[in-house]
Amino acid sequence: MNDTQASDIVSALQKVQQDIRTQELRHGRLPGSVQLLAVSKRKPLAAIQAAMQAGQRAFGENYVDEGVEKILALDDASVEWHFIGAIQSRKTASIAEHFQWAHGVDRLKVARRLSEQRPEGMTSLNICLQVNTDNEEGKAGVGFDEVAQLADECAELPGIKLRGLMAIPAPRSDFQQQRDVFARLRECLQTLQTRHPGMDTLSMGMSADMEAAIAEGATLVRIGTAIFGQRDS
Ligand SMILES: *Cc1c(COP(=O)(O)O)cnc(C)c1O
């Protein structure tokens, strides 16, 4: 990566941070209440380092092996790593050993494994339960009608800490329609909070629907393309 590419990342990161601050104000959110997770999947170490040098400290990865490789290579305890991909049972140990957060928890079996495999001496792994907001076939996540039971079960597990909800809604171009689905997720979290007051996180909003998510109460937005550019497929 040359200096131009690195400085492009820094300017894009600053623009996203500025957009978040502007949208917080516009939608009556407290300044600083929305955290930026920089999604660095399929981007090289140099891209992450450019963002780190500009002060970014939270990164999201979707592929376990790639993420672990980056975590070990960068070896920086001040950086927080979030696993945001779909979680396969056979990959839970690597997630539990290397990440601070897992956003895609959608079944008890996976939650139990993450809890059991979290190494002693590490703080509990923060988890969000993924909701399949549009009941899309083949997409990870529990239905709105199943999430309360899963939350009750996860709350009992010692190696994980239940922090909130996450969703990747079906793409919509209309702003109000984007808001409607995020509003449902927020209402779902508010209901759960009466029993689980530690659930303080709404992980929702990507490059294409960030403002609608902020308007509806996102506490963490997961942004890749708007910071690092398009990913090669
Ligand atoms: C890739 C990805 C993102 C970031 O998407 P962009 O559109 O590049 O901002 C956010 N969340 C999840 C779960 C992802 O897989």
Image (cartoon, grey):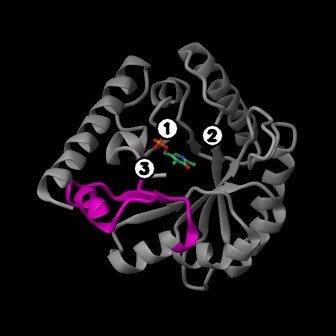
The residue identified by callout 1 is: 206
Q: Residue 180, position in %: x, y?
A: 65, 20
Q: Is residue 52 magenta?
A: yes
Q: Secondary structure at mark 1?
A: loop
Q: Secondary structure at mark 2?
A: loop
Q: Amino acid at mark 2?
A: Ile
Q: Earlier in the sequence, mark 3 or mark 2?
A: 2
In the drawing, what numbered circle is on residue 231?
A: 3
Looking at the image, which residue is at 69% across and 34% down? 190
Q: Is residue 18 left or right of residue 152?
A: left
The residue identified by callout 2 is: 168
Name the image quarter holding residue 93. bottom right
Marks 3/2: CA–CA distance: 18 Å
Q: Which residues are magenta?
A: 36-65
Name the image quarter holding residue 33. top left
- From the image, state whether disc 3 or disc 1 is nearer to you: 3
In the drawing, what numbered circle is on residue 72?
A: none
Q: Earlier in the sequence, mark 3 or mark 1?
A: 1
Label 3 lies in ligand 1 vicinity (Cβ under 8 Å): yes
